[in-house]
Image (cartoon, coloured by chain):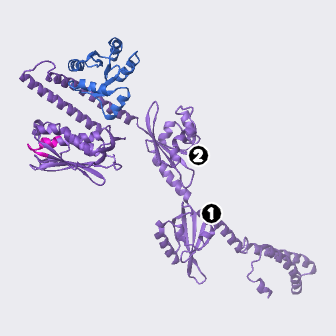
Amino acid sequence: MIAEKFKGKEFSIGFRYALALIIVPLASPVVVSFIQKTTAISTTLLGPVSILLLTLAYAWCIWAIRNSPQFGPSEEEKTAYQIKALNNHSIICMTDEHGTITYVNDKFLKTTGYSRDELLRQNLTKLLPRSIAAQYDFARQFVLEGNTWSGEVRMRGKDGTSIWTHTTVAPQIDKRGKVNGTIAIQTDTTQSKIAASEKTMRESLHLLNDEVYMFEADTLRYIYLNQAAMERCGWDEATYRKKTLVDKRRELNKDENFESSDFYDRARPLINGEVQEIEFILEDDFQVSEVKLQLIHPQNGPSHFISIRRDISERRAFEQTKNDFISTVSHELRTPVTSIKGALGLILSGATGELNGKTQKMLDIAYRNSDRLTLIINDILDLEKIAAGQMEFNLESVNLTELVMDAIAANKSYAARLNVSFVGVGLGQTTVGYCDCDRVFQIMNNLLSNAAKFSKKNGEVIVTLSNMDDRVCISVEDFGKGIPEDAKSSIFDRFTQADSSDRREKGGTGLGLSIVKALVESQGGSIYFTSEVDKGSKFSFELPKAGKTTINNPTVGLMVAAE
Amino acid sequence: MTKLRILHVEDDLDIQEIAKLSLETIGGFEVLQCASGKQALSEVLDFAPDLFLLDMMMPEMSGDVVLQNLRKLPGLQDTPAIFMTARAQRNEIVDLKALGAIEVILKPFDPITLPDQIKTALSIS
């Protein structure tokens, strides 16, 4: 009975020593008398022999105890230690075979931000981003078949943040050897993942010519400068980590009165979330830079600003040169033409006296050609301006009906000389468009004079204004020569006219349609035509209505001033 | 009726000749012509003009600066001014008018209609 009680129980070390201490002395008289009876040892030797036996017995006991497998912590104790260690280091979660959470350890709760109540009896998919649903299903099946799965899993915390983990999932096996659930052991690798991707990013940033500065939002202390930025400031990493934006402006930009409030004022729209990015130009004695500023709120870590600075001094200088060129050429070409035209005009008006027929004829020719020269100069400068992005368009609501009627009136006399008349269609009601009034007038002049020029004698030119949902359309149709097939594709190119003999006969610079196209497209519109030889041509252009104008013509590049 | 007196400042001598013919013969104005702002400032007070007609692009002193300086002289603060220029986008014209001109005439100008343009500008202002 007593034996059964002690059977299977773990005996502690102390208990075993105590046992030995008691049993051995108790057993010794028995042993001694046994030896006395069976051997012929004399009484005098019995004392020392007994002591020897006692000592040996003790020694054996101690040796046996120390070498027993239970020396050290007990099984219970060991398991307890292991569980404690696991709980402290790893994130643990157990589910049943359907994926319903049956247990989560404290670290799981701490990492994900949920409470135990929120998780127990929920399905594990609640914590996983939808994108890895397939991965999860596969892993779960795999484990339920008795296998252990291991991999990188991204979980979603309660606040939506991503938590990267290295995960091992093992099957839970019940007493009968059947798999009835899973146990997942995870290690949070978010920090090292972030560190790795940051490292890659920083290496890339070092390659840029632009200067990149990152500094904390609260303190304006620098957390990162790329190679270019470090060179500009003359700081190494150890130095810049101790500096703030204020230090930089005071020390390096010689802006002694710079305060952090100066920066925060400028960055206010970013801080308020009104804009994603602020762009501004910084000019100092040596260069002109374009600076882009953003405010980043990372999931793990404090908010910080990123500032990227690009040296645009060269670009500016080039633009300046172009500007100067256009205005210089403009002036230089127009000045002599002014004199030529002016002088001839005065003579032809009779202000210098009477002229004989031949003189008159010659002077007429000279005057007409100086006129053409003016037109060509204007056209070229217009095209250069558009190409340089320097043409400004004043977009506004324009009464197109009136504009078309004015254009017709302006070209009437020219057309009359060719025995051509204009017919207006759709001019009965007021149609309003959103465009640059002067430029559209210029477009109309060009199209109307072209149509008149190429019409047959006594011909008609039909001018139509139509109103569509989101745009207006103006077309100019003549019934004259038409454009041959092989000339159609280059009709909007510079210096082409369908038939070069036309140029001499009918005048014109050959630049008209290319300017018209540029002007139309700059205002967000489009231009197209149909034509048949000896039947006529119809040129149409469309302009968007108010609010729908996009001035982003990549081939032309424009500045737009909206009124 | 007394003739309108115009101070014309223009560095290009050919244009001066043409303008002179236009303004005197066709327009019937009385004209003092100067080839630079400096010359104009030294001669203007004796001439007592009713209008300044100023070229914009001049080497030493541009038209707007000439106007500024003219206006500092006694009796000339309110004299109307017209600029002549080859550069003229709409916004540039607005800018020029803001400098104190009642009108901007573009180059190349038509000498036949120049006098009428001036008269129109004066009557509007």
Depth check: give the residue in front, A497 or A224: A497
Colour-to-chain, blue: B
Q: Residues within 10 Å of mark 2 (few under 14, many from 20)?
A: few
Tell me the quadrant of the picture where the C terminus of chain A can be found: top left
Q: Is residue A208 above or below residue A198?
A: above
Please report the residue visible at 67 percent of the width from the left and 67 percent of the height from the top: A84
Q: In screen coordinates, is A6 left or right of A396? A: right
What amino acid type should be assigned to the residue bearing mark 2?
Answer: Asp
Please report the residue visible at 34 percent of the width from the left and 50 percent of the height from the top: A548
User: What chain is tagged by disc 2?
Assistant: A
Q: Disc 2 versus disc 1: distance between alpha carbons?
A: 27 Å
The residue mark sitting in front, 2 or 1, is: 2
Element type at marker 2?
loop
Whether A451 is among the magenta residues is yes
Which contiguous range is marked in magenta? A449-460
Depth check: give the residue in front, A551 or A103: A551
In the image, farthest residue toward the front:
B1
Element type at marker 1?
helix
Label annotation for residue A218: 2
Please report the residue visible at 84 percent of the width from the left and 79 percent of the height from the top: A23
What amino acid type should be assigned to the residue bearing mark 1?
Answer: Lys
Quadrant in which residue A100 is drawn:
bottom right
In the image, farthest residue toward the left:
A357
Q: Is residue A514 above or below residue B120?
A: below
Q: Position of residue A495 (x, y in %)?
A: 18, 39
Colour-to-chain, purple: A
Q: How many marks?
A: 2
Q: Is residue A97 above or below residue A269?
A: below
Depth check: give the residue in front, A39 or A28: A28
Depth check: give the residue in front, A311 or A541: A541
Q: Residues within 10 Å of mark 1 (few under 14, many from 20)?
A: few
Residue placed under numbered mark 1 in the picture: A110
